[in-house]
Amino acid sequence: MSCVHYKFSSKLDYNTVTFDGLHITLAELKRQIMGRERLKATDCDLQITNAQTREEYTDEEVHIPKHSSVIVRRTPIGGVKPAGRTFIVDRSDMAAGSSRPTDSSPSVSLAQLSKVLSLSLCVCVYGLWESGWGSFNFNSI
């Protein structure tokens, strides 16, 4: 019996997939990992990377040698979508620190954000005071 050791990037320990032969295809490895981890192929795809070389396997028919170690990441079926907004920083205005969004969304100044943050902090402190945290005696600890 041959095996490939795999671990999800968020985990500490490796698990093992066993198979017959000298190698396993990427498609078969993904299928076995999804079965062992009870993942549905309709919910996500798996990104497989060689743990030693950091080479990402993309061709479903590539052969992964026995006794290899791989890192697994779950990805959305359609792939990762790019962020909705892109900000362009004008180098001539770097001293002012201004940036403007490329879409037609309204821009918010730093002063407006500062006011919102201050108001949010006041609301939080007042809420804690009303709930009894204001009467806590720190000297009794």
Image (cartoon, rainbow, N blue to C red):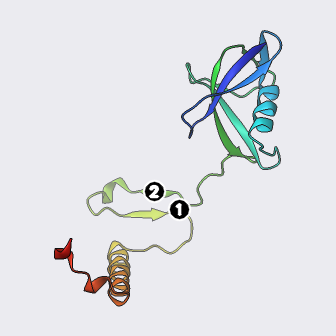
- Quadrant of the drawing holding the N terminus: top right
**Mark 1 to mark 2 CA distance (whole Å):** 7 Å
**Residue 88 marker:** 2
Q: Secondary structure at mark 1?
A: loop
Taking the image as shown, residue 88 lies to the left or right of residue 60, namely left
Q: Residue at x 62, y 31 (%)?
A: 7
Give the residue at the far left of this rendering.
139
Q: Position of residue 20 (x, y in %)?
A: 83, 14
Give the residue at the far front of this rendering.
140
Q: Do the CB atoms of the residues marked 1 and 2 lie less than 8 Å apart?
A: yes
Q: Which residue type does callout 1 highlight? A: Thr
Q: Residue at x 81, y 28 (%)?
A: 27
Q: Is residue 36 above or below residue 138?
A: above
Q: Is residue 104 above or below residue 135?
A: above
Q: Secondary structure at mark 2?
A: strand
Taking the image as shown, residue 45 lies to the left or right of residue 125, namely right
Give the residue at the far top of this rendering.
22
Q: Residue at x 62, y 52 (%)?
A: 82
Label 1: which residue? Answer: 102
Q: Which residue type does callout 2 highlight? A: Ile
Q: Position of residue 104 (x, y in %)?
A: 56, 70
> Sequence order check: which comes first, mark 1 or mark 2?
2
Image quadrant assignment for residue 31: top right
Q: Is residue 134 above or below residue 101?
A: below
- From the viewer's side, name the closer residue of 53 and 124: 124
Q: Position of residue 48 (x, y in %)?
A: 67, 30
Image quadrant assignment for residue 126: bottom left
Q: Position of residue 109 (x, y in %)?
A: 37, 74
Q: Residue at x 81, y 22 (%)?
A: 61
